[in-house]
Image (cartoon, helix red, strand yellow):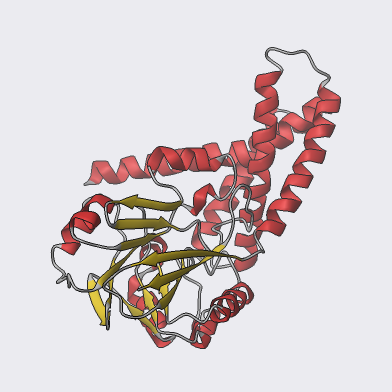
Amino acid sequence: MLLKTVQRFVFFWSFVLLAAYLVYIYPLQRLTDWLGYPALLNLPVVVGLWFIVTTVLWLSFRSSSRVLETILYNWMGIGFVFFCLCFIYELLRLVVALNDYWIAISILIAGVCIIIYSFWNAQRLQCKHLKFCDARLAGDYRLIQISDVHIGSRSVNFLRRVVTTVNAQNPQFVLITGDFLDANRIQAEDIAPLRKLKAPVYFSIGNHERYAGLDWVIPMLEDAGVMMLRSKTVKHGELQFIGIDDAEDENQVKRELGKIELDRNCFKVLLYHRPLGWNAAAESGIDLMLCGHTHNGQILPFNWLVRWQFKRVCGLHTQGSCRLYVSPGTGTWGPAMRLGSRNEVTCIDLKC
């Protein structure tokens, strides 16, 4: 146990140190060099900045300051864009002789344009419509899935817009597939707009709820009118909703579904945060599995990295009579930026 703890500690801080340099310092270092001012960020300055950035990151882990988080997260997103542009040029200049100065100017212009678009795109909410037919249904139903809203990274004003968008679709049920919040400084007033949803709300736990602490997250959500589905099922006529807590264990869905009584005569909807366990869901007779977690990468080219971890990153997938829908997320984690992805409210119509 001690060895694993030490290994996790070493891995975590190695990652933090590397990210602190590549995202926060490397773009500044290379751009000042290419613009003809290499002395601005000489080795002592780089080391000093690296130490300062790492210290501030460490303080942010222990702080509940929204201002500090906003600055660091958005700087992280901006730095990631410039890192990608600079790294592409680093590779290009290995094979092609180009003018560093004018390329640096081009990178600055392109980076600013991309960043402005990314911030703007992250403020938009788009509604995706899906329709499924099933002979067991005697009537029509409308479900709304929201996922990965990330209140904490996003503000209560953003949540108000989400609630307004959801209510405009006139759903019978609202299904939240985890990561609704991501900071332990969240208070009841930050999620109060949930009370204005005009339909019953069912919730499955995501990884960020676990990180924040379920002992206070769950009561706060329940006070806001949310029904938690934790290896639990609820029926509404011909519909059966099942929720399972998020876990890193790939067998979580299979194990927990084995404990739940499923009604073969109902249209069964499974809420599970990450897109794992679909085979087990299909074998158990689940008709529709709703997931999130991936954000569809959120910012290009990060979605390529996400595909290494998950086979199904976004969208609708079918296996026999079981469908899986992976939401790209309704909000954003960290920087309020979207590039190559979108904020989505998913509207699901079930027809007889």
Is residue 26 visible in the rendered image? The answer is no
Residue 306 lies left or right of residue 289; in this view the side is: right
240 or 84, nearer to the observer: 240
Vertically, is 173 above or below 79?
below
Label total for image: 0
Q: Is residue 34 left or right of residue 255?
A: right
Determine whether 47 is above or below 148 in the image.
Answer: above
The residue sitting at 41% across, 82% down in the picture is: 220
Residue 140 in the image, given as x and y percentages of width and height: 39, 78
Where residue 38 appears, as percent x and y from the top left, is 79, 26
* Viewer-nearest residue: 311 or 16: 311
Q: Position of residue 137 (x, y in %)?
A: 30, 75
Q: Nearer the viewer, residue 88 or 11?
A: 88
Placement of 267 over or under 336, stated as above or below: below
Q: Is residue 235 above or below residue 308?
A: below
Q: Quadrant of residue 336?
A: bottom right
- Figure quadrant of the C terminus: bottom left
Residue that appears at 72% across and 32% down: 29
In the image, what residue occupies the spot 41% across and 86% down?
Answer: 225
Q: Position of residue 43 (x, y in %)?
A: 69, 28
Residue 267 visible in the shown view: yes
Which is nearer the eye, 23 or 50?
Answer: 23
Residue 176 location, quadrant? bottom left
